[in-house]
Image: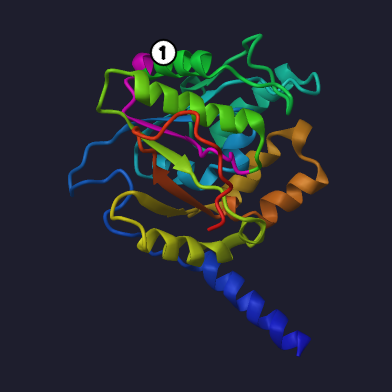
Amino acid sequence: MWLLTFASLFFVWFASLIAYFPRKPAFLISGENANKRNVLLVIAHPDDESMFFSPTISYLTSRGHNLHILCLSVGDADGKGNIRKEELYEACVTLKVPRQQVKVVDHPDLQDGFGNKWNHNLLSKIIEQEVLDCGIHVVITFDDYGISGHCNHRDVHYGVRKLLQETARRDIEAWELLSTNLLRKYSGPVDFWISMLFASRSPTGTVHCLMNENPRRSFIAMSQHSSQWVWFRKLFVSFSSYTYVNTLRSIDRSEQVQRKGNHQEL
């Protein structure tokens, strides 16, 4: 009985790894000859890109979009900020993002830590400047729970939302990476099926499910963060659904910036 159960789980896991059924319309493609977009991924710490957003990065770079990454701290909670900054550059090269398109902010009011609340006005201004400097069309970041509930992740979300509400530009799209419950979070590639079902039930074009076409690259990228590459993060990257699939939802400009964060029980 246990052998049959294990074999069934293995089959589902393996089938999930090789399955890739892109939805229509595809993410950031509105027509057959759609222009490539300038995209800004906004994260809180070095390694967020590899731990959580690698399916999105893989999708964008493989389709020729011009991806920039803005990291709003050096991750200096353990005094390794300079090391972690260089590790981020190396990881981004592995993920096919040029070093010159990666910016790391080291601001005294934006320091890594669970007890460090970041000012949303400051975040909005920094993100807006990067949008202007790089001619950004699309911004991608965490949702209001921030995957792990880390306050820095959540503050980054609110900084982006504040920018959307206060900027005069109406041509900027913004997308958030949806948080999931604990069971889904550690279901690996199996979560692809649930994500696809959720996306199919959402209004057309508001939710997109992106499968990582090269999960091995995600492991290699995360291993570039040598100072963080301890046993429990190795397990996380192996079993986390965020290594294999990202579900992105369009951020509604009309919602209040200070709404309560809700953990997505999808």
> In the displayed structure, does residue 265 sit left or right of residue 85?
left
109 on left or right of 124: right
Nearest the viewer among 151 and 233 is 151
Examine the structure image and report whether residue 28 is included in the region drawn in magenta: no
Q: Relative to the observer, which residue lies in front, 58 or 235?
A: 235
Left or right side of 19 for 206: left
Quarter of image, res 12: bottom right
Q: Residue at x 62, y 55 (%)?
A: 181
**Residue 46 showing in the rendered view:** no
Which residue type does callout 1 highlight? Gln
Q: In this rendered view, identify the residue nearer to me: 187 or 62.
A: 187
Outermost bottom residue:
1
Q: Which residue is depicted at the point 59% across and 51% down?
A: 243
Residue 5 appears in view: yes
Binning the other alpha carbons within 10 Å of mark 1 as few (below 14), some (14 to 19) or many (20 upward) gives: few
Q: Position of residue 86 (x, y in %)?
A: 66, 22
State which region is magenta. Answer: 132-147
Q: Residue at x 66, y 61 (%)?
A: 183
Residue 226 at x, y percent in the picture: 75, 34
Q: Quadrant of the N terminus?
A: bottom right
Identify the residue shown where x is 58% and y is 40%.
Answer: 145
The x and y percentages for residue 232 are: 79, 47
Q: Using the image, determine if residue 121 lies above or below residue 156.
A: above
